[in-house]
Image: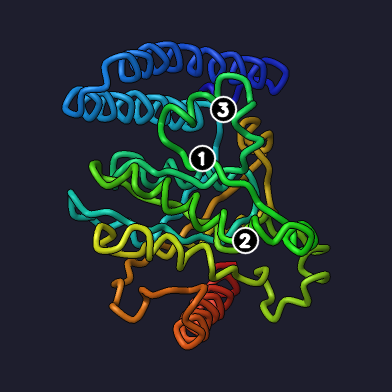
Amino acid sequence: MLASLPRLIRLPLVMLLLAGNIVLHVLPLFALTLAKLLLPLRGFRRACSRGLVAIAESWIGFNNRLFGWFTRIRWQMEGLTEFRPGRNYLVLCNHQSWADIPALQKAFNRRIPFLRFFLKSQLIWVPLLGPAWWALDFPFMKRYSKETLAKHPELRGKDRDATRRACEKFSHMPVSVMNFVEGTRFTPGKHRAQESPYQHLLRPKAGGVAFVLDAMGEALHAILDVTIVYPTGVANMMDLISGRIGEVRMHVRELPIDAELRGDYENDPAYRERFQAWVNTLWADKDARIAQML
């Protein structure tokens, strides 16, 4: 019924409810974060961390209900089986648009441990959301271009160290670490510039995945290989909010983390070559799957 409202009424109403949902959940999130900072007792802080995750899952759950009420999106999801509780996951996914994140949250909220994404450091300045992501221990990363690294070689390895510090925070709580392996959203221009060998994907960046596997060690139990496509065309967040997305298709498969997937990516050339070959095979399979899903 709500999805049939005129767009001039429906869109402002959805935006208002989404904004209200942010405020409703961010205020207790900040209050609990402050308590966690003021009383640095290990048991209390762990309880606060669980409380923060519960608030975030409630926040996402209400967003999901809003999209269900106000849009007619068809969600076709394969492979969302009963995941075993207490297991930590590394979630690997292709990156089409900003709509990917709420799509992943819809698929996995309360099914697996709370999803945490690697975010660009600049995003911490996003009003309300940036501090909320920080409070929820989302890893903020600085990305350096090849030109910057050439001028400042002392910056090499900073991204690896930041990954390790971020992953250390998750040693005492269940977690799902999300990685968009392409490192950026797919566009035809980027695809041409990279001379990507894949039809529907950019070239994968294996280093970030390897760093997470190394930093988390035995704490990670499995990989969730996720493929997202939008048959009606790549969409943005406004398309999602306004209901212009006709359908979202998602395929999930669980992969084991074999011993050979862990190693020193920077200093072990044999491991690096082997790991890159594994990621390239994963990406070739994903490219074929996207063609099939479309």
User: Which residue is nearer to you in this view: 30 or 92?
Assistant: 30
Q: Position of residue 234 (x, y in %)?
A: 69, 52
Task: Point out the tag, 3 or 1, that comes first from the N-terminus.
Answer: 1
Instruction: Calculate the distance from the C-alpha at mark 3 to the C-alpha at mark 1.
Output: 16 Å
Q: Is residue 219 above or below residue 259?
A: above
Instruction: Calculate the distance from the C-alpha at mark 2 to the C-alpha at mark 1.
Output: 33 Å
Residue for badge 3: 130
Name the residue type under label 3: Gly
Residue in the image at 28% along x and 59% along y: 220
Q: Is residue 256 above or below residue 14?
A: below
Name the residue type under label 2: Arg
Name the residue type under label 1: Pro
Q: Are marks 3 and 1 in contact (CB under 8 Å)?
A: no
Q: Nearer the viewer, mark 2 or mark 1?
A: 2
Secondary element at image label 1: helix
Q: Position of residue 160 (x, y in %)?
A: 51, 58
Q: Quadrant of the C terminus?
A: bottom right
Q: Position of residue 173 (x, y in %)?
A: 25, 41
Q: Which mark is residue 275?
A: none
Q: Which mark is residue 156?
A: 2
Task: Point out the tag, 2 or 1, that comes first from the N-terminus.
Answer: 1
Q: Nearer the viewer, mark 2 or mark 3?
A: 2
| Image position of 140 (left or right of 176) | right
Residue for badge 1: 102
Secondary element at image label 2: loop
| Image position of 238 (left or right of 114) | right
Secondary element at image label 3: helix
Q: Residues within 10 Å of mark 1 (few under 14, many from 20)?
A: some
Q: Nearer the viewer, mark 3 or mark 1?
A: 3
